[in-house]
């Protein structure tokens, strides 16, 4: 047992050291930079014209997105709770589809689908005037955030559901709405509040969608303003303004997430094994059919039509000509199938695999420590890395480690690990929480060595959660663009960076072709993971855990 | 040596390939990004051990002047016949962007820039954001400095329902798609789209297309300074300039074949030295009209 304690202390020290290097140090270096180069300008920066509007837009966007995404995600989790929903497996995968598409690709696809001279305009003469503007930004950020809420609330349902109580209530005469209001929703409340807090802070830091869809309409947020300042950072004052705004965003995020985490964290932990009785009360056959139809309609509007518009753009020979068969070409794919893009794709895959593997180790390390007070503090610290805006982390890491690692793939890897650590940690933590500690003690008492006990008693039942954490980190790292676009150097461009640069250069057909390619690169492993997960589930009775989704944008 | 640039791949890659072929043993690593990302990269470098580039090839003189003010570049330029109008003692223009008008086929073609403020274009003009695109900032500078236009030109555009988009390429795309009837864009963006079949016309309105030159400069602390000087000399030479012209960009050296350009097309130039000190005020005035920032 002394060996186990020593091992735990070593792991704790290592995890604390990595968290300091990846999170605290870059932030402190940024504070020092602002203090050293711009302390006399802080007043001017914080009162500069337009900043108030950008802060207001950011906060309103976060509130609106949270208010819409949380009910939709929770409703989807409730609707897909019953195995009797027609095509339930398909819809579960479908709900996750938007998050498998890079957010900037999703934004671009929506503009092509619903904007003026877009897909619906060409086909039906109808377009949405507001798609490029605050309403469009909010809609797409909601679509992007719904899977996160869906997964968190699904975890909450799986861990806390009391189907027997719900059935008892129904037998006693309560109607379905009363059961939902008095039993199901109170049980889901901690998960819903956690999802709301996470979505709120993640929306504060969202960048790609406001940049692609909001900036052309003059809609600015703190993150687009940071990017705009960085774009003008050949002027030193603009650079200091960018860092100051990033720190402001960190402060806002910390103010929101820390109380939420302190309040909600303990309530989300449970020590009982979940009841996997899924015969929940979800209404009759007609209601389930309506649910399936509603989910299908939502997915068609949210992801189906935009992705179809993206493909149409990719196969059309020139901008402005109708996407009819006479104008179809594979020339755009031929143009983007360059050696350089191929190298970028391979580099992206290697970075994503490396990051996901390191993250599962780090996430598992933090999760294994959470039964101690020190471990729980580290877990809270790690949660902060999730909500740090990507641009903030990138600039901080660039100033802190750029001297040695600037422009290399290593600094991009560091950024991925820092940003996604909390995302890797949560699904594993959720599974460990429901892993009875007595089993490990029993193995040790029976003579198993520490590592043997971990391998046979802990890792095996945790396999689905570990695979899910790895997959989520892999997918998120593969389409990460905010940090990559600021950190890459000669020979370290990722595919997402190539796509974004192409979009900025105006090569619309080529951008669409690259985006289709990138989406396929994400969909193929996602399908692979889905089948693997199903196979694992069918072999053994699973722990009640559902992978949480990246909120990193 | 390492080159930082915002110039498109279609131009930079042939130039590097030919330079390496003519200089055995020389190897150029390139970091290519839009001006904004390039600036962020340079700013990060400057605060973490120094600029990692040996040569910077920028897309506008204001960006280069800012680098010079921070002593990141400068101190040397090669002998060349490139006109004095587009060079200083610290950097030299090697390519030019021309701000032109683009119109959707079937829409009226403006004879002068001022025509874009008339009722023929109500709600149908796209302008690039000078806070995002350096070329758009050059156009803002030119119009503001021209007494016949001034910042009032932008106010009139806005009053006429003009819409601000991000970059000149976004303007070209929007006009080609029929979202806008006309816009202000760069010739390098409009002509290739037209060639591919997009339904647009390219116009060089009076008093002229606005010329924005892209300068190249040696980094102050270049590690491979001999190779870097060789590269800059090559880019400014007749051979390098011919390659730039053949790749679709407009070379700075007179007499070199260029891409599409109407015979005796009118061209005007902003006063860059004045614009350096005016740009913050101009941007603020502009943003009061079109928002952003």
Image (tube, rainbow, N blue to C red):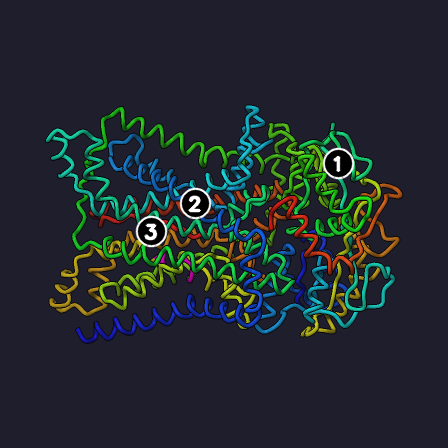
Q: Is label 3 in contact with label 2 (beta carbons under 8 Å)?
A: no
Q: Which residue is mark 1?
A: B116
Disc 3: which chain?
Answer: A
Q: Which residue is mark 3?
A: A468
Quadrant for residue A212, please give it.
top right
Disc 1: which chain?
Answer: B
Q: Residues within 10 Å of mark 2 (few under 14, many from 20)?
A: many
Q: CA distance from mark 3 to mark 1?
A: 56 Å
Q: Nearer the viewer, mark 3 or mark 1?
A: 1
Please determine whether, in this image, residue B252 is positioned above or below residue B128.
below
Q: Which residue is mark 2?
A: A100
Q: CA distance from mark 3 to mark 2?
A: 14 Å
Q: Is residue B139 left or right of residue A291?
A: right
Marks 3, 2 in one chain: yes
Q: Residues within 10 Å of mark 1 (few under 14, many from 20)?
A: many
The quadrant in which the N terminus of chain A is found is bottom left
Q: Residues within 10 Å of mark 3 (few under 14, many from 20)?
A: many
Is residue B26 visible to the viewer in this orientation of the structure? Answer: no
**Upstream in the sequence, badge 3 or badge 2?**
2
Q: Which residues are magenta?
A: A418-424
Q: Main secondary structure of the magenta part?
A: helix
Q: Is residue B34 left or right of residue A440?
A: right
Residue shown at 11%/30% (left/top)? A171
Q: Where residue B39 sits in the image (x, y, percent)?
A: 63, 61
Quadrant for residue B60, please give it.
bottom right
Q: Where residue A235 sits in the image (x, y, percent)?
A: 65, 63
Q: Is label 3 in contact with label 1 (beta carbons under 8 Å)?
A: no
């Amino acid at each position: 047992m002394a060996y186990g304690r020593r091992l735990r202390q070593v792991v704790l020290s290592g995890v604390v050291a990595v968290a300091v290097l990846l999170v605290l140090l870059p932030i402190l270096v940024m504070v020092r930079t602002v203090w050293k180069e711009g302390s006399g300008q802080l007043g001017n920066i914080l009162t500069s014209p337009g900043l108030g509007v950008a802060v207001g837009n950011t906060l309103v966007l976060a509130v609106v997105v949270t208010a819409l995404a949380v009910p939709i995600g929770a409703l989807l989790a409730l609707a897909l709770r019953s195995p009797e929903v027609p095509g339930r497996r398909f819809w579960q995968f479908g709900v996750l589809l938007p998050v498998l598409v890079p957010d900037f690709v999703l934004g671009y696809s929506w503009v092509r689908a619903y904007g003026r001279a877009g897909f619906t305009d060409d086909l039906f003469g109808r377009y949405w005037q507001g798609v490029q503007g605050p309403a469009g930004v909010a809609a797409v950020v909601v679509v992007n955030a719904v899977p996160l809420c869906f997964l968190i609330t699904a975890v909450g349902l799986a861990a806390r559901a009391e189907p027997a109580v719900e059935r008892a209530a129904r037998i006693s005469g309560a109607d379905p709405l009363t059961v939902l209001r008095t039993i199901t929703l109170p049980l889901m409340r901690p998960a819903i509040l956690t999802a709301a807090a996470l979505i709120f802070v993640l929306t504060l830091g969202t960048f790609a969608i406001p940049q692609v869809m909001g900036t052309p309409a003059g809609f600015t947020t703190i993150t687009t303003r940071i990017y705009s300042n960085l774009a003008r950072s050949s002027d030193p004052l603009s650079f200091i303004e960018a860092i100051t705004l990033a720190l402001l965003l960190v402060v806002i995020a910390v103010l929101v997430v820390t109380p939420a985490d302190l309040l909600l964290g303990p309530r989300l932990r449970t020590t009982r094994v979940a009841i996997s009785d899924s015969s929940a009360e979800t209404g009759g056959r007609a209601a389930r059919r309506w649910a399936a139809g509603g989910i299908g309609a939502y997915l068609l509007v949210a992801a189906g039509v935009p992705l179809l518009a993206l493909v149409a753009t990719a196969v059309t020979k020139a901008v402005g000509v109708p996407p009819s068969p006479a104008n179809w070409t594979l020339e755009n794919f031929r143009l983007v199938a360059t050696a350089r893009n191929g190298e970028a794709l391979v580099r992206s895959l290697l970075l994503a695999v490396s990051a996901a593997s390191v993250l599962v180790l780090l996430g598992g390390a933090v999760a294994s420590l959470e039964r101690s007070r020190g471990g729980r503090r580290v877990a809270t610290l790690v949660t902060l890395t999730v909500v740090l805006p990507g641009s903030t982390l990138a600039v901080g890491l660039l100033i802190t480690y750029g001297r040695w690692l600037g422009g290399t793939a290593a600094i991009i890897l560091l950024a991925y690990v820092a940003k996604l650590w909390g995302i890797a940690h949560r699904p594993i933590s959720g599974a460990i929480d429901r892993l009875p500690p007595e089993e490990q003690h029993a193995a040790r008492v029976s003579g198993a060595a520490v590592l043997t006990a971990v391998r046979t008693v802990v890792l095996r039942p945790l396999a689905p959660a570990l695979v899910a954490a790895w997959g989520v980190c892999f997918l998120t790292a593969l389409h990460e663009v905010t940090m990559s676009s600021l950190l890459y150097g000669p020979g370290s461009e990722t595919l997402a960076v190539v796509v974004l640069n192409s979009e900025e250069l105006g090569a619309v057909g080529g951008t669409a072709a690259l985006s289709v390619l990138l989406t396929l690169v994400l969909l193929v492993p996602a399908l692979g993971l889905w089948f693997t997960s199903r196979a694992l589930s069918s072999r053994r009775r699973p722990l009640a855990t559902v992978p949480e989704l990246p909120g990193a944008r | 040596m390492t080159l930082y640039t915002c110039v498109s791949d279609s131009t930079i890659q042939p130039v590097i390939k030919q330079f390496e072929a003519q200089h055995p043993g020389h190897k150029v690593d390139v970091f290519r990004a839009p001006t904004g990302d390039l600036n962020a990269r340079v700013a990060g470098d400057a605060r973490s051990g120094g600029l990692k580039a040996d040569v910077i090839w920028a897309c506008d003189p204001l960006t280069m002047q800012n680098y010079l003010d921070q002593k990141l570049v400068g101190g040397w330029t090669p002998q060349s016949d490139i006109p004095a109008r587009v060079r200083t003692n610290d950097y030299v223009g090697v390519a030019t962007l021309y701000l032109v008008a683009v119109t959707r086929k079937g829409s009226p073609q403006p004879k002068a820039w001022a025509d874009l403020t008339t009722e023929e274009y109500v709600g149908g003009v796209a302008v690039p954001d000078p806070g995002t695109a350096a070329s758009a900032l050059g156009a803002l500078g030119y119009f503001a400095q021209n007494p016949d236009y001034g910042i009032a030109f932008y106010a009139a555009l806005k009053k006429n329902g003009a819409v601000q988009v991000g970059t000149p390429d976004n303007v070209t795309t929007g006009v080609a798609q029929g979202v806008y009837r006309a816009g202000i864009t760069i010739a390098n963006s409009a002509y290739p789209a037209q060639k591919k079949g997009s339904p647009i016309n390219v116009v060089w309105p009076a008093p002229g297309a606005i010329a924005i030159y892209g300068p190249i400069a040696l980094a102050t602390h270049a590690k491979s300074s001999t190779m870097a000087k060789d590269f800059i000399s090559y880019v400014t030479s007749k051979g390098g300039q011919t390659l730039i012209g053949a790749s679709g960009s407009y070379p700075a050296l007179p007499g070199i074949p260029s891409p599409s350009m109407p015979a005796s097309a009118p061209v005007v130039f902003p006063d860059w030295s004045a614009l350096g000190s005016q740009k913050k005020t101009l941007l603020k005035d502009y943003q009061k009209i079109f928002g952003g920032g």
